Amino acid sequence: MSDTLTETLPILFQDEHLVAINKPTALLVHRSEIDRHETRFALQLVRDQIGQRVYPLHRLDKPTSGVLLFALSPEIAKAMGEQFTTNQIRKQYIAVVRGYAPENGIIDHALKEELDKYTDKKARLNNPPKEAVTHFQRLATVELDVEIERYPQSRYSLVQCQPQTGRKHQIRRHMKHISHPIIGDAKHGKGVHNRYFKQHLDAGRLLLHASQLTFNHPVNGEGITLNAPIDDTLRQLFQRFNWLHSLPKEWQ
């Protein structure tokens, strides 16, 4: 008998057509050339956990946590795919960003496709930028008495983001575009802030979480809203910043 324990993931919703999990950070959705050494994938873990094949309906970046939805048949995958393609799915994210973000706003900034040298090597290099729109709202702020860059204090915001389109790294790139990059974003953020959060605040992950997904059930048309609670890393950070009360109870 093997002494290794089978890893299980938190299931947020399951019926005969769909299953949704709360994906932890640092977990790939499926096998990728980007992380050829990786052996853990949400797709295989969910399949083994529920004992049947699953079909991914959307993606979350490896470091992003939160709601991840799978279909349980090709027919349901096709029906749900149409909702995703026509932007009928409502997604809500929360993120910790550098600086005091505006109270609310709409980022309407077209994005060129970010190509990966492994997975996108057959993609065209000269595609024009595609429409990308993100709505955001500031939920809370904090000022730390620590000099990280040129100011004696350092400011951060908790923001809620609703992407209207689904471009690759859209929220990460849009928040950088308005000069409020997400903490922990190695590609689009600032290393000095990322290191401070990792070394002094026990928050060494990308501080982006897919907190809510709303859609119509593909069989009965019922409106469904799935909420994913934050993980321990985010919870201890939000407690430290006195931010927990700024979140709906379902996300805490």
Image: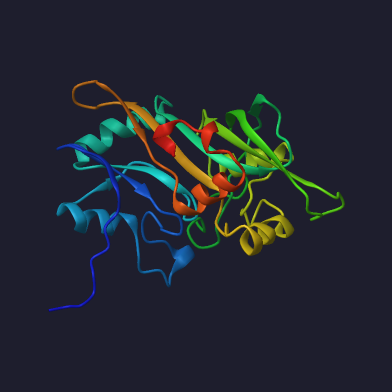
With 251 as the anchor, is 199 left or right in this view?
right
Vertical placement of residue 73 versus 107, above or below: below
Task: Between residue 174 and residue 116, name the one nearer to us.
Answer: 174
Vertical placement of residue 198 versus 92, above or below: below
Q: Which residue is drawn at 60% across and 29% down?
A: 136
Within the image, what quadrant is residue 217 found in? top left
Task: Between residue 189 and residue 204, name the one nearer to us.
Answer: 204
How far across and how far down the image is residue 80, in percent? 30, 32
Q: Residue at x 53, y 44 (%)?
A: 168
Image quadrant where one finds the N terminus: bottom left
Vertical placement of residue 127 versus 38, above or below: above
Within the image, what quadrant is residue 176 found in? top right
Image quadrant where one finds the C terminus: top left
How far across and how far down the image is residue 151, in percent? 86, 49
With 172 as the anchor, is 192 left or right in this view?
right
How far across and how far down the image is residue 6, in percent? 23, 66
Within the image, what quadrant is residue 201 found in? bottom right
Q: Residue at x 56, y 44 (%)?
A: 238
Please, which colouring scheme is shown?
rainbow
How far across and how far down the image is residue 194, in percent? 66, 57
Vertical placement of residue 181 versus 216, above or below: below
Q: Residue at x 26, y 30 (%)?
A: 79
Observer able to see residue 66: yes
